[in-house]
Amino acid sequence: MRPPLLHRRCPEVVGSLPFLRLGKAPTPVQSLPGLGTRAELWIKDESGYGDGGWGGNKVRKLEWLLPEARRRGARTILTVGGLGTNWGLAAARYAREMGLGVALGLIDHPVDEHVRAQLERLRASGARLHFLHSKTRLILAAPWLFARHSHGRTLPYYLPAGGSSPLGTLGAVEIALELGAQVEAGELPEPTWLVTAVGSGGTAAGLSLGLRLAGLRTRVLGVVVNDTLTLDPASLLGLAHRSAALLRARGADLNGVEPAPDTIRTETAWLGKGYAHPTRAGDHALTLASTQAGLTLEHTYTAKALAALLDLDATGRLDGGPVVFLQTHGPR
């Protein structure tokens, strides 16, 4: 099994932070000239990551979270998401391969053909689904969910939405370390910006920490696509700092590396009516990506992130340097 770059960067944590490889690394980087940007545009493509029944960057978080669940002796994972949750489906399918059960608390959002198909996949995954409709009802149901899915005195291992805990965030640290190695190998120039959708915060937070650990000056531009969580730069940096604290608590020597306040910028103007609501700009970006670059995006995350990138580039707000778009959608 190919060891994670984080274990090479911080060998002190090998014994205390177990890792389970679930995909083939590194994911590729390539130039993306077909979208007409003024900036030199590249893509780091996570869409093919994952050797199991689902793909994309969600699998990166599970590589750290599932071994921790097993280390704690958990028999069930309890997590939450929207009706069309890619995170929940990935958790259910990969956890099942490890003999772990999964319970999902689901809240409502707009339903289209993709969401209907996703619900069928969720029902077929073996996960126990609890349709709680709203965030408020989900919070109120939390004690019952923990009790319902405990095994004797063993509570379920709880994972927040998107797996964006300090531990799950290490999945995006690994993506950034890969990017750093690819820059060092001359596969692409050092980017000025790394653009990603922000749905639960873990990817942006982990990237900001990982880029510093990789020795890059690249900043993270997070395009917020979720209006149910606080996802401003301060919150994302707070999560990055908690991940750094976790690494130090497990024995890592980070040599004083911490993401600075200017390492993450967020944009909210491309959210539209809210989470999972398509936008005209997103629809345009999705079509353009498909016809001009052969990319498969989706309405909730990646289409909005690319729409923001294209608009910011057109108005000269990306500083003129190379830009990397993180393709997080794993179509299966």
Image (cartoon, grey):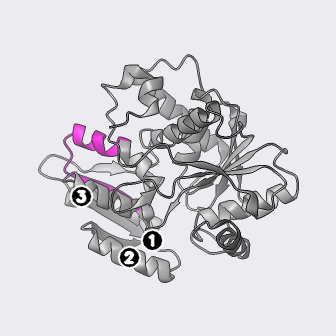
Return the disc, 2 or 3, that comes first in the chain's sequence.
Answer: 3
- Closer to us: 12 or 146: 12
Where residue 80 appears, x then y in whole percent?
Answer: 39, 60
Q: Is residue 246 visible?
A: no
Residue positioned 57% across, 68% down in the render: 296
Question: Looking at the figure, which quarter contains the C terminus?
Answer: bottom left
Residue ID for mark 1: 84
Mark 2 nearby-residue class (10 Å; few <14, some 14–19, many ≥20): some
Q: Which residue is outermost to the right? A: 315
What amino acid does circle 2 point to? Leu
Where residue 163 appears, x then y in whole percent?
Answer: 42, 50
Q: Is residue 2 visible?
A: yes
Question: Looking at the figure, which quarter contains the N terminus?
Answer: top left
Magenta stretch bounds: 64-80
Return the disc, 3 or 1, that comes first in the chain's sequence.
Answer: 1
Kindly report which numbered mark, 2 or 3, lies closer to the viewer in this rendering. Answer: 3
